[in-house]
Amino acid sequence: MSELLFHKEDQIATITINRPEVLNVFRRSMFQHMLELLEQVARDDSIRVVLITGAGRAFSAGIDLKEVAHLFDGTMSMNQARAELNEMQELTRRMVELSKPIISAINGLAIGAGAEIAIASDIRIAAPTASFAFAEVQRGLFETNGVMHRLPRLIGMGRAAEVMMTGEAITAQSALEMGLVSRVVPAKTLMDTAQDMARKMAASAPISMRLIKQVLQRSYDLDLEAVMRLETEGTLECLASQDLQEGVQAFIQKRAPIYTGK
């Protein structure tokens, strides 16, 4: 059975991390496989939204330490270690740069790489059984995959400092209160809720969705005038699109719009 399951339906691509017997820890090959799936999504115009979740009782408990033991035993040069870390960090880059929104449905433990995938997503929904941990400080390690950039933007600098400097686990309810997740829903309805959200997003105009994601990704690093310039350019792009005409006609005719991304 594949360690990453891929399913496409209703313009939604669902990626399931599928090593439940070991809490969905990532093997090195899974990073490359995930990159390949994201590239497939990027090329497929029929896919509008990506949904990521885990099989069993975990989202992902991180990286398989047996596979990366060579990083810790002193046998690898710093240049080799840097190359491997950059390879793993490419997953965050691709997720952030993907023009389509990504929802993570966090069903259980999200630690290490699991937490990193969650925070690289655009939206996070959690079950009450979900928990997060950035426990590198307790292992003599350091954050990777953009955590130092994205986590403070999600929950604020003070809270980010606390959770990274203590390494303490974050419950689903605490994650909701600090803004790490946007919803906590019963475990039995987690995927239904995530799929309903994905379907609503998939039914929206793809050009507008792409622009929203792109500008939101940059907004913390730009001043007001720069963001407003991006808003102006985005609005002009929408005004020139067929989708805007479809949206207006659908509103007038009191029907659901059918967007083509053109």
Image: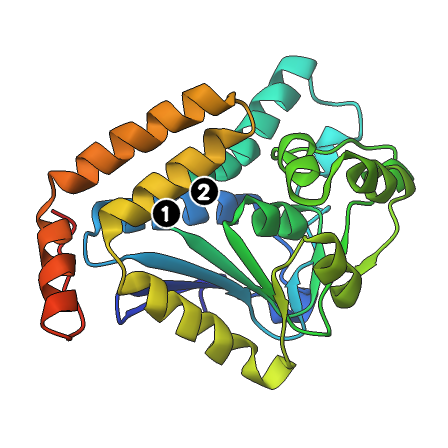
Q: Secondary structure at mark 2?
A: helix
The kind of residue tagged 1 is: Leu
Q: Which mark is residue 153?
A: none
Q: Percent x, y for residue 249? A: 9, 63
Judge the density around disc 2: few (<14), some (14-19), many (≥20) Cα neighbours within 10 Å. many
Q: Is residue 140 left or right of residue 81?
A: right
Q: Residue at x 9, y 53 (%)?
A: 245
Of 76 and 147, nearer the camera is 147
Of 205 and 20, nearer the camera is 205
Residue at far bottom of view: 188
Give the image quarter of residue 77. Answer: top right
Image mark count: 2
Q: CA distance from mark 1 to mark 2?
A: 8 Å
Q: Residue at x 68, y 40 (%)?
A: 151
Q: Is residue 8 left or right of residue 111?
A: left
Q: Secondary structure at mark 1?
A: helix
According to the picture, the residue beneath numbered tag 2 turns out to be 95
Sequence-first tag of 1 and 2: 1
Labels 1 and 2 touching (C-beta < 8 A)? yes
The kind of residue tagged 2 is: Met
Q: Residue at x 56, y 76 (%)?
A: 190
Q: Residue at x 57, y 48 (%)?
A: 117
Of 246 and 9, nearer the camera is 246
Judge the density around disc 1: few (<14), some (14-19), many (≥20) Cα neighbours within 10 Å. many
According to the picture, the residue beneath numbered tag 1 turns out to be 38
Q: Is residue 234 left or right of residue 164?
A: left
| Image position of 70 with respect to 118: above or below | above
Give the image quarter of residue 19. Answer: bottom right
- In the rendered image, the quadrant that contains the N terminus is bottom left
| Image position of 250 with respect to 135: above or below | below
Q: Is residue 17 visible?
A: no
Q: Percent x, y for residue 133? A: 78, 51
